[in-house]
Image (cartoon, rainbow, N blue to C red):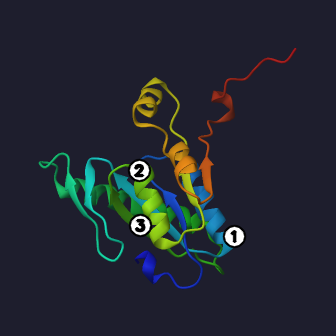
Amino acid sequence: MSPERFSGPPPLLVGVLPHQHPEVLKTATSLAAKLAVPLLCAYVDEASYLVEWDPTRSAHRLSLHPDKDDDDIRSVTTELRGVIAEAVADAAAPATPVDWTLRTLAGDPGRALARLAAESNSPMIIVGTSERGLTHRISEMLNGSVGLWLTHHQSRPVLVVPYRRPAHQDDARAVS
């Protein structure tokens, strides 16, 4: 279902990624269920860039890797649809099911999510923090933080859901 087809209140927008920590979707679906609003999930393919954007038409995009098969994108979205459906089923009460859809976008994740939020009139954008570790820190230094960019460059509230490790993995400080 496209965001233009949501009836009633505008949807909450959540950025989703393959193998993302489940806290992001759990938080987004739980909030959507409690507020009785639909959920608009968005996956941004960073290997593509936006050539032309017109809110009344579909976006035209070109791949930075032309030899990349469209089957790759289809398999990612199929996997994401399954994960989202499971999260929605777990969070929603039988009396108040959460209506949701998945959109695949192109380009810079922060800018793409901001454009979609404006297009769908979403009252809030929900994103996760990056994983811990040196590789993810280097990537964030080079590419920037999506949540940070969103909080500084658009006017909608942004909910940044932290990655929570199990208690036995947290760095516990000894209290004497």
Category of crowding for the residue at label 3, using alpha-carbon neighbours closer than 10 angstroms: few (below 14), some (14–19), many (at least 20): many
Question: Of marks 2 and 3, which one's residue comes earlier in the chain?
Answer: 3
Vertically, is 50 above or below 3?
Answer: above
Category of crowding for the residue at label 2, using alpha-carbon neighbours closer than 10 angstroms: few (below 14), some (14–19), many (at least 20): many
What's under tag 2, amino acid-wise? Pro
The residue carrying mark 2 is 109
Label 2 SS: helix
Q: Residue furthest right?
A: 176
Image quadrant assignment for residue 77:
bottom left
The residue carrying mark 3 is 102
Image quadrant assignment for residue 142:
top left
Q: Is residue 12 left or right of residue 120?
A: right
Label 1 SS: helix
The residue carrying mark 1 is 34
**Which residue is located at x 68 percent, y 72 percent?**
35
**Which residue is located at x 44 percent, y 65 percent?**
116
Q: Residue furthest bottom?
A: 7
Question: Of marks 3 and 1, which one's residue comes earlier in the chain?
Answer: 1
What's under tag 1, amino acid-wise? Lys
**Which residue is located at x 54 percent, y 46 percent?**
147
Question: Of marks 2 and 1, which one's residue comes earlier in the chain?
Answer: 1
